[in-house]
Image (tube, rainbow, N blue to C red):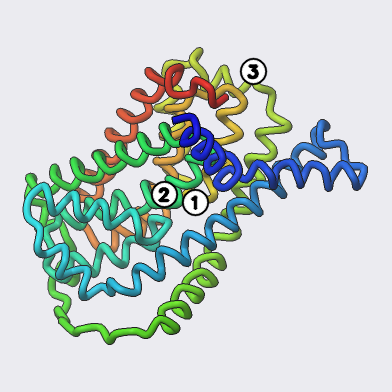
């Protein structure tokens, strides 16, 4: 049993967390006479280490997911989802969201396509919730930072929000609040051509380049903010606002996170720095969920496809679910974080 524990710790710390990279970066900066214990040197160390770590994990993950996705083009995906009914359809759509685009804005075109193709509205909303909130990137990054226990719980609770949220929307029969041009779009059923292994590799590589081009600025911004918090913001400030002294910290985190725009790779460094400074675990995870799921730009895009009443219901369902997750993690954070920080 100890062998498996040691193996998992190695995977978590050295492969996903890349502690070897953290130590190597520190030694290189020290060799350049940079004081990594100081504010500027510590911020530079945090910035270089996190940017490299996130970019490496991002590229590997996107390549793997894109290669798998090459076997499931939109036409085939619609057919697969169409085979499920009821709660199983919502669960299948939520699981599909874990291996599709990494931010809310890039998920909306797929949501529109699925809705226009005739899939039940609740099913498409389960996809729309889970896609930015609980992708494979969040599982890998959270495992490397917070451990597998927290990462798995985050993903499971995110999927529950997606399934329950989609089911609620389905039961309320909100189809009349979808813009008519979405439902009137012509449905095309074309079998996608088969690809050779080389073509699939080329497709995956192209997806890596395209996604990295889109999200790299947000990675830099997120890591930059995380570096400032980690090395410049006093821990007592963070604890007073986002720690146990403030019972409204989860509400505050969601309120701050909703107007922002970033994907999971841009929010994790901020979450890592906040947690290290004394913020509560549930508050940090609620902030991440709010940023990735309910960003202002994505809500503006979504408004083009659905009417205000349905949009308000979608936001309310997501906010309630995120708040529940935040309070749950805050309640049990002493147990969950034991041995991690």
Q: Quadrant of residue 259?
A: top left
Q: Is the C-beta separation of discs 1 and 2 under 8 Å?
A: yes
Q: Position of residue 133 (x, y in %)?
A: 37, 47
Q: Position of residue 114 (x, y in %)?
A: 20, 66
Q: CA distance from mark 1 to mark 2?
A: 8 Å
What residue appears at the point 60 percent right and 28 percent down from the top-left corner?
Answer: 276
Task: Name the residue that disc number 3 marks.
Answer: 236
Q: Quadrant of the N terminus?
A: top left
Task: Name the residue that disc number 1 marks.
Answer: 262
Q: CA distance from mark 3 to mark 2?
A: 28 Å
Q: Earlier in the sequence, mark 1 or mark 2?
A: 1
Classed neighbour count for the residue bearing mark 1: other residues with Cα under 10 Å, few (<14), some (14–19), many (≥20): many
Q: Quadrant of residue 104?
A: bottom left
- What is the secondary structure assignment of the residue under circle 1? loop
Above or below, comparing residue 204 to residue 255 in the picture: below
- What is the secondary structure assignment of the residue under circle 2? loop
What residue appears at the point 25 percent right and 50 percent down from the top-left corner?
Answer: 311
Residue 307 visible? The answer is no
Task: Name the residue that disc number 2 marks.
Answer: 295
Classed neighbour count for the residue bearing mark 3: other residues with Cα under 10 Å, few (<14), some (14–19), many (≥20): few
Q: Earlier in the sequence, mark 3 or mark 2?
A: 3
Q: Quadrant of the C terminus?
A: top right
């Amino acid at each position: 049993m100890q062998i498996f524990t040691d193996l998992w710790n190695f995977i978590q710390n050295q492969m996903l967390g890349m502690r070897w990279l953290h130590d190597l970066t520190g030694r290189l900066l020290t060799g350049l006479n940079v004081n990594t214990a100081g504010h500027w040197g510590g911020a530079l160390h945090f910035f270089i280490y996190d940017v490299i770590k996130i970019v490496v994990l991002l590229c590997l993950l996107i390549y793997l997911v894109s290669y798998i996705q090459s076997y499931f083009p939109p036409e085939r995906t619609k057919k697969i989802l169409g085979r499920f009914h009821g709660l199983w359809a919502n669960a299948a759509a939520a699981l599909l969201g874990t291996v599709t685009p990494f931010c809310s804005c890039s998920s909306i075109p797929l949501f529109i396509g699925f809705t226009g193709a005739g899939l039940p509205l609740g099913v498409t909303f389960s996809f729309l919730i889970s896609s930015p909130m609980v992708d494979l990137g969040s599982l890998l990054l959270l495992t490397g930072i917070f451990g597998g226990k927290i990462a798995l719980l985050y993903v499971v609770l995110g999927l529950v929000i997606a399934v329950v949220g989609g089911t609620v929307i389905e039961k309320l029969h909100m189809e009349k609040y979808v813009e008519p041009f979405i439902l009137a779009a012509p449905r095309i059923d074309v079998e996608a051509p088969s690809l050779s292994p080389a073509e699939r590799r080329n497709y995956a590589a192209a997806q890596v380049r395209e996604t990295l081009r889109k999200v790299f600025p947000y990675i830099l911004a997120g890591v930059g903010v995380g570096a400032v918090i980690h090395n410049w913001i006093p821990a007592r400030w963070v604890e007073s606002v986002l720690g146990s002294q403030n019972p409204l910290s989860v509400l505050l985190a969601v309120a701050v996170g909703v107007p922002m725009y970033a994907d999971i790779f841009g929010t994790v460094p901020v979450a890592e720095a906040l947690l290290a400074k004394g913020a509560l675990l549930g508050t940090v995870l609620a902030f991440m969920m709010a940023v990735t799921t309910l960003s202002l730009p994505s809500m503006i895009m979504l408004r083009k496809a659905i009417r205000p009443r349905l949009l308000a219901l979608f936001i309310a369902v997501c906010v309630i679910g995120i708040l529940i997750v935040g309070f749950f993690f805050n309640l049990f954070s002493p147990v969950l974080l034991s041995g991690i920080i």
